[in-house]
Structure formats: C-alpha cells, structure tokens
Image (cartoon, rainbow, N blue to C red):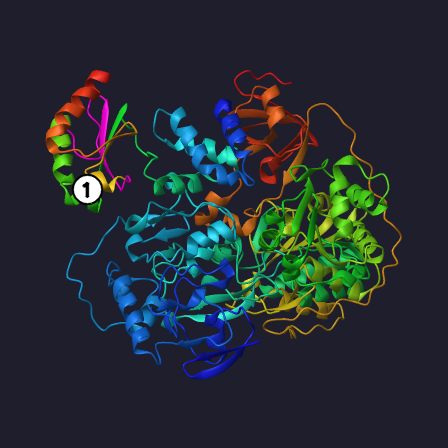
Amino acid sequence: MVRVTIDGQEVLAPKGQGLVETAASVGIEIPVFCYEPRLGPPVGACRMCLCEVEGLPKLQAACTLTATDGLVLRTARTSEQAAGGQSAILEFILLNHPLDCPDCDKGGECPLQDLTFRFGPGSTRMQFPKRTFDKPIPISPLIALDRERCILCYRCTRFSESVSEDGQLVAANRGAQSIIATFEDEPYRAHFSGNVLELCPVGALTSTTYRFRARPWEIQNVPTVCGLCPVGCNVWATTREGKVARILSRNHPEVHEGWLCDKGRFAYDHLRAEDRLRTPLVRVRRRGFEEASHEAALDAAEAGLRAAGSSVVVAFSGGETVEQATALARIVREGLGSDAALLPDDWDAALDAFRAPLSAIRDADVCLILGDDPVVERAPVVDLWLRAARRAEAEVIAVNPAGDVQAAPGSAAQVCADLREGKKVPTELRETAKSLKSAKRVALVWSEDDPTGGRHVGALANELHENGRAEVAVYVLPRTPNGRGVATAWYTVGEGRSDPPGEGEIGALVVSGDEAASDPRVADLAARASFVLTTAMFQSELTAWSHVVLPGTSYLEREGTYVNLEGRPQRLRRAVVPFGPDELEWLAQLAERFGVAIDPWAAPTAAEQADLPPADEFAWSRPDPQAPPGKPAGPGLELVRIGALFSGAAVERIPQLQFQRPAAEVELAHEDASTRGIAPGEAVVVTSNGTSRELRAGLNRKLRVGVVRIPAEHAKDFGDRVQVSRLSTGESR
Amino acid sequence: MSGLYDAIRSVAARYPESRSAILPALRLAQQEHGGWLPPEAFRDVAEALELTPAYCRAVASFYDMFHLEPVGRHMVEVCTNVSCALVGAQQVLEAFEGELGVAAGETTPDGEVTLRTVECAGGCGWGTVVVVDHRYHEPVRPEDVAEIVRELRDAS
C-alpha cells in the first residue's frame, strides 16, 4: 500500500492502482472520456482528466498515472489550474461537436453533455462553421455513425482491436483528419460489434434499432439475464410503454465483464414478431387448427394426455426456467407416471468439483479447448475470456479440425483419453501434454454436444488435479441457455430418465418450446404420437404436427431462475407482460387436472447479481469413460456442421440481424481446394446423401486436410461425408 | 498472387510477430500493384499477416509513402512544412502546378506525373525541398521548376 494525497485528503491505495480508481475510492471524481480499464492500458487520448501533480510543471492526464508513494494530486475541485485545463479541453472537444443534443439519441444519458455541464465553459469562442460529414454513416445495419459528433477517444477502436480482436473498426488517417471507419464501407460484421454503442461517450455511434425510439426520461430499465445462450450475461432490459426498446449490459465482472454479443443485444424484438402465437390452437378433425379459448385448449390437452395413459414423452427446449421445468417434470412424472424425456443437455453433477467463475479463465496458465464447435458460436462471451487469457500470456490451445492442434472431427473424447493416459501420447498432442503437465492453473473448455454429460473432460480434469496437482476449472458449454437448470430440475423431481422408445406408437408427446419443436428427433417422435401438445412462440411447419398448441413466451416475459454454464443460478425478471398466461400458469392449470399442485407464481430466490456457489468437495469416483470409436473413412470430405450463433427463431425475425447470419459457404482446407482447382470465393457444388447445393468456397489455412465446415443451416440433409467440386466443371473428385 | 503471399511471409519470418512486418509488406504490395494500394492489396496483405484489411488500410492511411489512389509513373513531392514554407514553398508548388497543369494531389491526364505536398522531408537547412521519384532536389526556387519538369518529361 502507498500513501497518496488527493485534494488534501490522504488515501491508502495499492501500489500501481490507477488514480481514477484511487480518487473514486474516497468519493472524488476525475472526469474521463477515453479511460476504460476493460479496454486495456490507458491511452490518455481525450485529456479530460487533466489534474495538477505536485512537482510537475504541467497538468497531467491523471488516467495514465498510478498510485505511487507521496504523490500529491489536485483535481478540478481544489486546483484552479486543473479546473481551467479541463474547461479548456471541453471547449476544444466542442470546437467541432455539433450542438444537436435535442435530437441526438445520447441526449440525457451523454457523458459529454454531463461533463460539459459540470466542468466545461458556459460558452465558446468558436465563431467558424463546424466540420460536417455525410450522416449517418451505416457502419453496419445495426450501428449508425454520426462522424461530426465523434471526439476521437478511440474507445470503439480499442474494443475492436484489443477486446474482441476483430480488427474491423479502425481509426484511419492521421491527426485532425482521423476518422473512425471500417474497410471500404464494408459492414462491421462481428459477434460483439454492439458493445461499441455502450462504449461511445458521445452520440457518434448509435444503434439503428433504438435510434429515435425513446428518451432517457421515459424509459425503465429492468435488471434481468439474457436467455439466448448458456453464458447468462446480466442485462438491463430498457422498456418504454410496455415494450422492450433495447438491451444494455449490466456488468457482472465474473460472468461477462459487461460485454454482450450482438444476438443478446439485438434479438429482443422477436417478442413483437408478426407470426407470434397469441391464442391457443386446437386441431379439429378435417378442419385443421382452430383458435380456442384457454379453457377449451386445456380440456383438449387433458383429454389427449389422459388417453395416452403413461405412454408419454416430454421434449424440453433448454429455454424453460427452472420453475417451469420443475412443473413440467412433476406433471409428467407424478401426474402421468412416465419418466421418458428428451433433455437438450445432460450434466454430470460430479463436475461441480471443478466449478469456477468464467473470469478464472483469464487467470489460467493453460486453456485447453476441446470439441468441434467454435466457442464463439456456442457461448460467445467465453471466447472473449479466452482472448483475455491469451493477452495475459496464457497458452490457449484449441484442439479441433481448425484449431492449433488439427484433430479429427468428433475426436474430443479420444483426445481427453490420450492426454489422460500420459503414455504414448500421439505426436500432435505431445506439446499440449507437456504444457498441461507444467501448468499450475488449467481451464478446460468442452465445446460440443456431449451425451455423457462432460465425463470425458471431467476424467481429464481429475487426472490433472490428482497427479498434476493443478488447480483445474472445467467449463462444459451446454447447447441451450438453461440446459443445466432443466436437467437439474428433471433429476430433482424424480430418479433417472428413460429414453423415448425407438420405435412404435407413442401415446402422447409434450413439446416444450420452439427449440424442441425444431429438433429432428422430436419430429420423428411426433410422427409416431397419437397426441402432441406443444408450447411455442411461433407458428411454423414445426407446430403443424401438433394437436394442441399453447402460446409460449420469451425469456423477457417470464419470472424465474436460469442456471448458466458455470452453475450460477440467476434471476430472470419479467421485463414486459406477455399478452396471455405464461408457461408456468398454463402448467399449473394443467397440473391441477392431474392432481399435482403447482404454484403458478415463480418465487425465484437468486440475487440480482448472483454469486457462484462454491465448488463441491472434491470427489471424482466415476469410471473412466470410453471414447467412441472414430468414424470410418470414406470417399469425399468429412463434414463438420457449425451451429452458428446468429441462427434460430429469434434471429430470423430481426431484419437488422440478417447480415450477421452465416454465409452460404463451405470452408475448405487449402490443400483440398488446390487439388480441386477451387479458388477462394468461387461457387462450388457440395453433394451428399443425394442432396446437392451450391455454396461459396472459403479457404481456411488452419483447417485439417480432408475436412470441410458448413454452417448447419446450409448443411441440411447432408450426411457425414460430402463431395465438393467446381461449379463450372461439375466434375466431382 | 501467391508470389506476393510468399514474399510477405518470408519478410514476416524475420520478425518475432508477423504483424510487425506490416510496413515492408505494404511496400511489397504497393510495388506489385503499380505504385498504389487498391482494396485487393489490403486483402492480400491481411491474409499473409493474419490481420484484417481494415487494420492494414488504417496503417497505410497514416503514412505518406503509401498511396490509396492511383498515382502517375513519376512522383513530385513538395515539402510545405514550416521551414520550406518560410522560404517560398507555396510559390514553388504553384510553379509546379502551372508547369504540369494539375493541382496538388492530382495526376497529369497522361498518367505520367503526380504532384503532391508532403510533410517535412528532413532537409530543413536547404528549403524548399522537392522530392522527385525519391531523389531530393534542394533548395528549389520557382525558377528551377521548368527545368525539373523538362528532365522528368525527357526521362519518360
């Protein structure tokens, strides 16, 4: 600890602490625009923080200084020189900044407006015309840039360069001519682009989905949790007149450090999609679906379920709240006497011995990423933590077909076994094994569907912990937002689970939510079921095989608990009221008819910013799991399907997000492309299982030879192996 | 284009981090593309150094020796920074404009000569500095301009 004097007040601060924080710890504000510790080291670009430091002749940018013993700092509160300097900086910043606050979206929640009011001059000496630009410039369909408002603080470009590392938003030119720009007016297409909107301290970057929609004094911000991926980022849902108007981040430093992906930030308007189901539908013989009253729909549901006896299967989506999943599990288990369920994610509770907050990834020495799914598509913010780890000089090793170690598709379990074994490690994994052996802190990330509930990676973690004496954190990335919570709910209500029968008639199928409805396994079950009860937000061909459809709600319309991938129970709050009963209310009413008492009002107990429960006592007593055998080789190339983040029912309904959806592209290894004479960007024909599709060729120098990657939505009906050939020759090799 | 890719990779191999090779890589790309950097050039450099085209363009836009627009076969650069300005750089520039028939920043219609102003060329003791195809002429007075242009025209 060192002693610093700020405005005559002595402060004890850790040595090296930034002076902005030191001053804040005793309630003294040093005003800033460019300073933002989450973006890395300070740059001192805006000069708003000018303060007087004893012994130095000129004013100093306080944000670039750190606490050192004996330092005497005077801020604008006690130093006339500092006050004059800050006021002059504001006059300078405002030279070219337009006075359009009344119609600027930032007005009312603008740091420049606020700091000018408090620290700036009341007037300006500027009598010349201000600089103007074309406006607004669409940086992307999501972000508008009003260049004349920009004060060149470089927060947005620092985010792009050193947090998301997408390198797409840059400062071009030099000095007074500097501008924020993308390459050749191409859109800023990246998973985390929306964060620059919240970083911008002026109205230069505004969101096209919120621009001119609301004023800060007519909105309410509801604290809740994003329900679109298993990270569970904490958010504010801004509501205006009972509608969600935007999503802002609510920084939980252990979970997401305040960053959001563009899906979480921009997909909220699916609540108001045209094709949302608003009334229950009941299938009437020969007439198809007819709208029904709540009572009639419940009658039909009850009748269908009763006729099925105990031959009932339930398919979960993984988007249900814990309360809702518990209610449904009780109806099926206690009311109907069945234990057949499809769970989107399975979870082995023994893994809780390796539980750690996501922020622990940044502190690891070695991060090992296993599985074929890109982390950023499955749990986007985890990718930011891994990048932070790499910047902190951790060794980050991805083992997958396009990773640092180019493993065969589907070999993650085998890789775990090889690394665990210790002896006869395959050549390509030798370096990895060595790194793991010497690491003190290890983060293991499993990024693909795992029906064994993470036991392969758990066994590896156990080995590293027992014999390597390393501190190990395990992150198994579920496929769905609350897959962990749903699985836990299912196993809390009763013992075990049986798989749905592989063939033959099924009495009734209960489909809970749109994601379950789009699962091909569910479509197969539905074809064999005499009665199908579906809850869904949207009507689609997927609900067509249902007999009763109840309108579902979104995560922004429900009260309850979500358990994120870490195992952190978080509180979901109702930001806006749905137009009818939510799922829990439906389930409570249905349960009553089967003699099960369910409280229709969720009583979530999780805190607004929830803590992670401590890791369980270490007790790994699982038998070593067997890795599945490798797939046999065959003709053509092996296909890896990428489940893209920007896909699914919510994204499909947001026009501004369409440019983010995965391109109709097939990624080829360099060698595979050149042997086929395929150039990057060329149109190619991909054939598999009798299905042919024209896609664009993309070359990936890191991809394993003999493997192609295609976004899942462009790989429908393909088998495990594909043929790729040039469009012009049509000849397959 | 794999010639450029390999050339950039071999330059990058001399640096601990490949992105450090951005300036020589841009120079190679500029040579390859006839003295300026079209959008494809940034894509090529970006691919070879595992950077983004936006980053490469941002770097190039900072430096005077990279050209983001097509240039003529010859380049006439007149320093207009303070030392040269004090001894008549403006008049020298105007003389070039008159002689070549183009304004600063433009290229003659025959595509032969580009005229532009530059920041300090480092010859402050002998202003006005004029750089013709990387060769310094100093000091240059307005009356010397006709001769410089004639030599340039003869050379081509």
Give the number of callouts. 1
Which quadrant would residue A534 be assigned to in this image? bottom right
Q: Percent position (x, y) of residue A720? A: 70, 32
Give the residue at the far front of this rendering.
Answer: B125
| Among the 4 quarters of the image, the one containing residue A94 | bottom left
Task: Give the residue displayed 52% in from the left and 66% down from the top.
Answer: A250
Judge by depth and name the residue closer to the eye, B68 or A532.
B68
Residue B43, percent across and down?
A: 45, 33
Residue A334, located in which quarter of the rendered image?
Answer: bottom right
Q: Is A364 one of the magenta-colored residues?
A: no
The reply to whether the magenta stretch includes residue B121 is yes
Identity of the residue drawn at 55% across and 41% down? B17
Q: Provide the residue designation for mark 1.
A: B84
Residue A215 shows in the view: no
**As displayed, is residue A263 above or below residue A604?**
above
For numbered disc 1, what is the local secondary structure? helix
Q: Can residue A185 be seen in the rendering of this structure?
A: yes
Q: Amino acid at mark 1?
A: Cys
From the viewer's perspective, tell me whether residue A416 is left or right of residue A5: right
Which stretch is magenta? B102-122
Rendered position, A477 above or below A216: above
Q: Give percent across and percent down for residue B24.
A: 44, 33
Closer to the camera in the image, A435 or A594: A435
